[in-house]
Image (spheres, grey):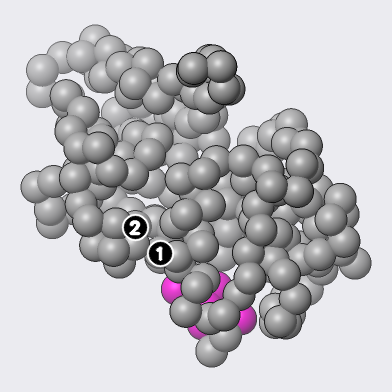
Amino acid sequence: MNARRLGSETLVIATHNAGKLREIGALLDPYGVHCVSAGELGLPEPEETGTTFIENALLKARAAAQASGKPALADDSGLCVDALGGRPGVYTADWAERQWFEGAPGRDWFMAMGKVEGLLCELGPDVDRTCRFACVLAIAWPDGASAVYEGWAEGRYSWPPRGTMGFGYDPVFVPKGRDRTFAELDPQEKHNISHRADAFAKLVAEQFG
């Protein structure tokens, strides 16, 4: 990787997910970074053909950087459940099939959470519910330079879903040392302990330290 520091130019956040954009924007705001999403720019979503979080994050960041002519930041994250051999992993979003909600495209995260719970139940009442969220942040520049940062949040899978904050699998993830799910935590408390925050701490140390 040919890492470099971000300048004062606009940073494209390679996502069409409003919840993810809010989290990333909140984490970058203290550093005066102006963010715009790929969705706002009308950029297409590239097909995620990678088999690892790093491959997919770089694929999305490079596509956004090339299409916009600006540096781009992509996040590839997922839930890895020990008893399921690390699944859904890089296919986390795929388990939430695309649906239409009130005329707009989206993903059915409740269905995805139910799939994981169903598989765990098949393994018996004493199944190990240890799991973790993984996050890879990739920055790409239009000239091909890039940098990658990895983060993790350890926890356990809880059922039924609880909480109305957060997004994705947050309502079933209880972080280690807590008794509430990510979706029950105040956003700032989640930012302090999340997998994305862990990856961002590494990004900030290199980019703004």
User: Can residue 13 be spotted in the picture?
Assistant: yes
Vertical placement of 9 versus 197: above or below?
Answer: below
- In the picture of the structure, the residue carrying the numbered disc 1 is 197
For residue 185, side relative to residue 132 (left or right): left
Image location of residue 89, percent across then percent down: 48, 35
- The residue sitting at 41% across, 65% down in the picture is 198
Image location of residue 119, percent across then percent down: 30, 15
Image location of residue 62, percent across then percent down: 79, 53
Q: Which mark is residue 38?
A: none
- The residue sitting at 31% across, 17% down in the picture is 114
* Residue at the extreme right of the image, as rendered: 143
Vertical placement of 12 versus 125: above or below?
Answer: below
Image quadrant in which you'd find residue 148: bottom right
Q: CA distance from mark 2 to mark 1?
A: 5 Å
Q: Main secondary structure of the magenta part?
A: helix
Q: Amino acid at mark 1?
A: Ala
Q: Amino acid at mark 2?
A: Ser
Q: Which mark is residue 194?
A: 2
Vertical placement of 115 versus 171: above or below?
Answer: above
Quick check: is 9 in the magenta stretch?
A: no
* Residue at the extreme front of the image, as rendered: 102
Quarter of the figure with the N terminus: bottom right
Q: Residues within 10 Å of mark 1 (few under 14, many from 20)?
A: many
Q: Please provide the residue range marked out in magenta.
A: 201-207
SS label for mark 2: loop
For residue 113, side relative to residue 68 (left or right): left
Image location of residue 2, percent across then percent down: 78, 73
> Mark 2 and 1 residues: CB-CB less than 8 Å, in contact?
yes
- The residue sitting at 51% across, 62% down in the picture is 25
SS label for mark 1: helix
* Residue at the extreme bottom of the image, as rendered: 209
For residue 14, side relative to residue 118 (left or right): right
